[in-house]
Image (cartoon, rainbow, N blue to C red):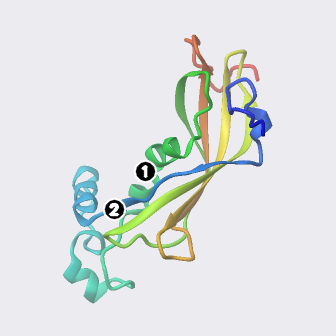
Amino acid sequence: MCTEKYTFNNAENFIGRELGVSSWHEINQHDINTFARVTHDPDPNHIDPESAREHSPYGFTIAFGFQTLSLLTYLCKEAGIKPDGIGDEYNYGFNSVRFIGPVPAGARVRARCSLKDVRTRGPKHKVLTVAVQVDVEGEEKPALVAEWLVMVGCKGSQDVPLDGAKA
């Protein structure tokens, strides 16, 4: 069986295909508390289990939505969104992000990534549109769905095309 390798030069051939699924990653209370501290957001629904039991709609602490979103770089790289033959990569933004369900403290999440689109940005760069679903282990509903834009450059590229670059 011949399997085509996902590369910078043939990324368009992978549109509509799943690129991969990451392993499970635990989001524990310590991680949630650290995220709260560095983002200056001491929301008790996230950091105070006793308060969350009494006042949150879930009855337990949950990860921040932006915390789950921030894990996409790690989870999606592990899932294989980077094509072979790239020299650089940049977060180019999102077409959409939706926080669908909570991630309880101590839960494990993983990312499922598919290539939705590829746009050429000059001779040495492409913008990949990656459809991402972050699953919570044991839950039917995902925690997050997003369309993430990742700019990649072929090896040896130096200049990053900005929005004014010719496509």
* Image quadrant in which you'd find residue 152: top right
The answer to whether one can see residue 36 in this image is: yes
Residue at x-position 62% and y-position 20% = 161
Distance between mark 1 and mark 2 Cα atoms: 10 Å
Q: Is residue 49 above or below residue 10?
A: below
Residue 71's disc number: 1
Q: Answer left or right for 57 relative to 15.
A: left
Quadrant that contains the C terminus = top right
Q: What residue would you read off at disc 2? A: 27
Q: Position of residue 11 (x, y in %)?
A: 73, 32
Residue lying furthest bottom = 54
Residue lying furthest front = 1
Amino acid type, residue under disc 1 in the picture: Leu
Q: How packed is label 2: few (under 14 Cα within 10 Å), some, or many (20 or more)?
A: many
Q: Position of residue 28 (x, y in %)?
A: 28, 64
Q: Who is closer to the viewer here, 95 or 80?
A: 80
Residue 144's disc number: none
Counting residues from the start of the chain, the first of labels 1 and 2 encountered is 2
* Image quadrant in which you'd find residue 57: bottom left
Q: Position of residue 23 (x, y in %)?
A: 47, 54
Q: Is residue 69 above or below residue 14?
A: below
For the residues bearing labels 1 and 2, Cβ distance under 8 angstroms: yes
Q: Secondary structure at mark 2?
A: strand
